Amino acid sequence: MQKFTLMMLTCDKYSDIWPAYFGQLRKYWPQYTGEIFVNTESKRVEGTGIKNIISYPTENFQWDTPWSYRLYKCLEQIQTEYVIFLMDDFILTDYVDQEEIEKDISYMENDKTIACFNYLPIPGEPEAIKYDRYMQMPKKTPFRINLQAALWRKSYLMKFIRKHENPWQFENWGSIRARRYSDKIYHLRKDAKRVFIYPDGGIIADERWHTEAAVELLKKRRV
């Protein structure tokens, strides 16, 4: 039984990147056979060759529907206890460490206070090293909450979300808001093996394709 669901965070205007996203996903994460929720406004994903893609929402949102509202409504439809975020421009360039994800889920099952395993390091000095591969950062660390690839406990996310926020507010104000909660958020150590490997920061910047990252990826991977 699948214990987590993959959610692709995207929007209609970036639909041109979806074929690359799903092509690399199929290549580098063949073990994942669960549902994939595509969180966007109104467009539907077609022709990927991947089963179990659910283009959410089932009813169209408007272009100005708040991002966090869409996120919350999508989470309401997910049946698993855990969810993995993978933004639309996080185009995989190597194999996903499925074994590590399964370990992290077992840690969360054994410790209900763990809210998130974030799969990218953030700057700062950790308070502690956890499970060998992860850091526990001080609560005032900037961007302790972020939208990098991560395994989340869905119930924590749903109590944490403020439905009017955009992605940048979610990260900035969310990191401040998270100080009030005792739930544990772990980040990958700087010297640890990556679980998800994709161009740092993704291949979109300032609402445009980040030229250097995009061109390098397309040349090397023939996406």
Image (spheres, helix red, strand yellow):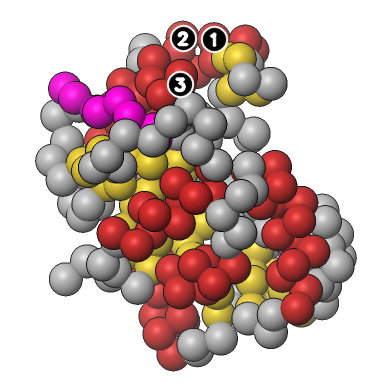
Query: What mark, if any, has residue 14 been given in the picture?
Result: 3
Prevailing SS of the magenta stretch? loop
Mark 1: few, some, or many residues within 10 Å (few <14, many ≥20)?
A: some
Using the rendered view, name the quadrant where residue 139 is placed. Answer: bottom right
Q: Are marks 1 and 2 in contact (CB under 8 Å)?
A: yes
Residue 156 vertical placement versus 42 (above, below): below
Q: Provide residue 123's location: percent of width, then percent of height.
A: 82, 53
Residue 41 vertical placement versus 106 (above, below): above
Nearer to us: label 3 or label 2 = 3
Residue at left offset 74%, top offset 67%: 177
Residue at left offset 45%, top offset 21%: 14
Going by the numbered disc 2, the residue's amino acid type is: Lys
Mark 2: few, some, or many residues within 10 Å (few <14, many ≥20)?
A: few
Going by the numbered disc 3, the residue's amino acid type is: Tyr
At mark 1, the secondary structure is: helix
Q: Is residue 109 left or right of residue 25?
A: right
Of the image marks 3 and 2, the number of the one nearer the N terminus: 3
Q: Is residue 125 left or right of residue 119?
A: right
Q: Label 2 belongs to which residue? A: 219
**Mark 3 to mark 2: distance in Å?**
20 Å
Q: Label 1 belongs to which residue? A: 215
**Magenta residue check for 191:** no
Residue at left offset 31%, top offset 21%: 19
At mark 2, the secondary structure is: helix
Q: Is residue 129 left or right of residue 26?
A: right
Q: Provide residue 176's location: percent of width, then percent of height.
A: 79, 64
Q: Is residue 23 left or right of residue 157?
A: left
Q: Nearer the viewer, residue 72 or 149?
A: 72
Res. 99 in view: no
**Mark 1 to mark 2: distance in Å?**
6 Å
At mark 3, the secondary structure is: helix
Q: Which residues are magenta?
A: 40-47
